[in-house]
Image (cartoon, helix red, strand yellow):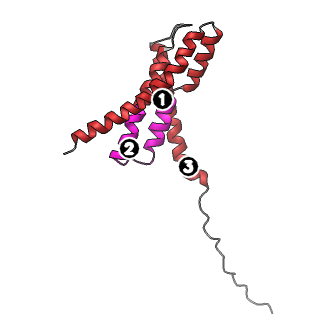
Amino acid sequence: MTAPETESPRIRPAALPPPAWRGQAPVVAAVALGGGAGAAARYAASLWWPSHTGGFPWTIFWVNVAGCAVIGVFMVVITEIRAAHRLVRPFFGTGVLGGFTTFSTYAVDIQNLADGGHLRTGLAYLAATPVAALTAVWLAAWSTRRVLKWRQP
C-alpha cells in the first residue's frame, strides 16, 4: 500500500525590490523628452538667426545666455518658492534647458574661429560667453528673489 499523495506546501520567495533602473526610467524619459525639445528650439534659433562664418557666433551666445537666465529663475522658483513634481526639474532643468544651451557648440565655434584665422574673435567669444552666462544666472536669480519678495504681503 502506498501513502496518499499530499501536496507539499509552496514556499513563496521574499519579495525582491524592483531593479534600480525601474525607478529611474521616468526620470530618464523626462530628461530625454525635455532634451529633445530644448535641442529642437536651439536648432530653430540657429536657422532663424544664422551666424556668418568667421563672425561672432551671436546666436549660440544668446541661446546660452538666455538659457542660463531661465535656469536662474527656474531654480529660485522650484527651490525657494514652490515645490514641484519630482519630474519637473529633470524635464525642464536638465532636459529642456540642457538641450537648449550648448557649451559643446561653443567650444566647436571657438575652434572653427581659430582654425579659420579669426583668433581674436574666438578669444573674445571664449571670454564673453562664460562671463555673460554666469552673470545671467546670477542676475536672473537675484531679480526673481527681489520680485517675489516685493509681491509678498
Q: Is residue 78 magenta?
A: yes
Q: As displayed, is residue 15 above or below residue 75? A: below
Q: Is residue 92 magenta?
A: yes
Q: Seen from this angle, which residue lies furthest bottom?
A: 1
Q: Label 3's element?
A: helix
Magenta stretch in the rendered image: 70-99
Q: Seen from this angle, which residue lies furthest left?
A: 153
Could you tell me which residue is drawn at 63 percent across and 16 percent down?
111
**Amino acid type of the residue tagged 3 in the rendering:** Gln
Residue 121 at x, y percent in the picture? 55, 11
Quarter holding residue 126: top right
Q: Residues within 10 Å of mark 3 (few under 14, many from 20)?
A: few
Magenta span main SS: helix
Task: Find disc 1 in the rendering and name its residue.
Answer: 38
Q: As displayed, is residue 52 above or below residue 85? A: above
Point out the tag, 2 or 1, that comes first from the N-terminus: 1
Point out the tag, 3 or 2, that comes first from the N-terminus: 3
Whole-angstrom CA distance, mark 2 to mark 1, is: 19 Å
Whole-angstrom CA distance, mark 1 to mark 3, is: 21 Å
Q: Quadrant of the C terminus?
A: top left
Q: Nearer the viewer, residue 51 or 148?
A: 148
Whole-angstrom CA distance, mark 3 to mark 2, is: 21 Å
Q: Which marked residue is nearer to the observer: mark 3 or mark 2? A: 2
Query: Tag on residue 78?
Result: 2
Q: Quadrant of the N terminus?
A: bottom right
Contact between marks 3 and 2 (CB within 8 A): the answer is no
Residue 45 visible somewhere in the drawing: yes
**Amino acid type of the residue tagged 2 in the rendering:** Ile
